[in-house]
Structures are given as structure tokens and as C-alpha cells.
Image (cartoon, helix red, strand yellow):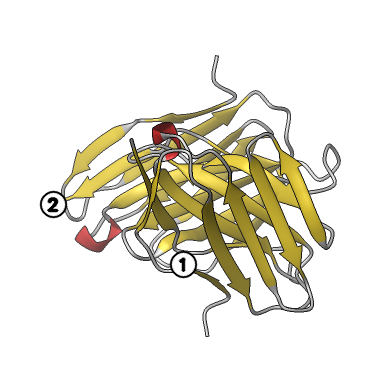
Amino acid sequence: DADVTQTPRNRITKTGKRIMLECSQTKGHDRMYWYRQDPGLGLRLIYYSFDVKDINKGEISDGYSVSRQAQAKFSLSLESAIPNQTALYFCATSDPGLSTYNEQFFGPGTRLTVL
Amino acid sequence: QKEVEQNSGPLSVPEGAIASLNCTYSDRGSQSFFWYRQYSGKSPELIMSIYSNGDKEDGRFTAQLNKASQYVSLLIRDSQPSDSATYLCAVYNSGSRLTFGEGTQLTVNP
């Protein structure tokens, strides 16, 4: 079984719709992250959470919100989707208590298209 | 200036050659450095981590770090067609945020 899972894997939606992307992990990591990836722009951090009660904005949080329902679950919401939110979205996890490097491990991604 | 810059690609090498991927970073307080491999449409996969100046080898991969020059590189020896992918350099800056370069696309020709 995959350590980090994301649902859905693909989603097509329309402008103005609310959409939620979900991430679950069985790695036991405390820290979870949401990134988006666009061609030519690399991976950019949207939000991150160091534990259930800790949520932080990343570099591109406008238009997004998150919820950390449990240590293992971290959801990303687009309240009113717009076409420039079309991208590949990745969830990642890490735990500095388990590794000197605090490496981040990525889920399989969600391809989101907003029409 | 971008926080993390990678050599522009795409990079093409023949099978069996050494592929050299380069990355520079702007924050002198950066502490940890990573190389991820990403196949088209897939998620980034961690292949190397390096923390100290010098070389770190893992199989066919060698990561090199020079903090004075703010430079980190990845060498892939005996390149194989299966190494064809985009390679992402990532750096934990002094603010503990992982910042990625835009990636270098590598093609290994049989």
C-alpha cells in the first residue's frame, strides 16, 4: 500500500465550483504539505501543517484553504475554483524527529482542470 | 534572483555516459539539499540528500555540495535510458522552507 495517498487522482471541474482534494498518510509523519506544480514554475508551497493544531500559509495560499483533520489527514479546498488553478497538486509529508534531513515524501498527485 | 536555480535543459547524454546536473542557491543559511527525480506525470521521488560539504555517493549517483560557492550537483554515472526524467534540486533555506528549482530534463539516448 502507498504511504501517501491522494484523492481524487484526476478531477475536471467548472469555474466557481468548490472542490476538495484529500491526502492521507500511513508514514506516521507529523508534518504535511500541499504543493502545486505548473510547467516552467516548478513546485510551489500552498500550505503546510506541523501538527493538527498548526496550519501555516505557504507562498501561494490565496484562493485555497486547508484542514488538518487528524495527524494522518490533510485536505486542500478551493472555495471557488478558477481556471488558473489548473495544475498538478501534490501532498507531501516529513518528520524531522525521524531523519536528520527532514526529507519530504510525495503522494501520487491530483491533476486538476478548471474549465 | 531565484532562490534555487538549475542549469537549463534539456540535457541529452548517450547511454553509459556521465550526466551532470547543477544547482545554485541564494540563501547562505541553507542547511539541507536534495535531489528528486520526476518522471512525466508522476510525483517527485527522493534520490539523494546531502548535508555536509563534499561528495556523497549512492550507487550510480553522487551528490556534491560546496556551501562556500552555494552550489550542489548531481552526477549520474553509467547513465541508462531509465534515468530519463526531470531532476529537481530542493533546498531547505534558513526559514526551514523547502524551495525547489524548476528542474532539468534529462534524456539518455540508447
Residues behind callouts 1 and 2 on a single chain: yes
Q: Which residue is mark 1?
A: A60
Residue reaching furthest to the bottom = B1
**Side (left or right) of A96 relative to A8:** right
Front one among A85 and B44: B44
Task: Decide which of B82, A71 is in the foreground and name it.
Answer: B82
A31 vs B79, left or right, is right
Q: Which quadrant: the C terminus of chain B? A: top left
User: Could you classify mark 1 by the number of other residues whose Cα lies within 10 Å: few (under 14), some (14-19), or many (20 or more)?
Assistant: few
Q: Which residue is mark 2?
A: A115
Kind of residue indicated by mark 2: Leu
Q: Quadrant of residue B40?
A: top left
Check whether the beta carbons of the residues at disc 1 and disc 2 lie within 8 A of each other. Answer: no
Task: State which tag comes first along the sequence, 1 or 2.
Answer: 1
Report the amino acid beneath label 1: Ile
Camera-side residue: B15 or B81?
Answer: B15
Q: Is residue B84 above or below residue B68?
A: above
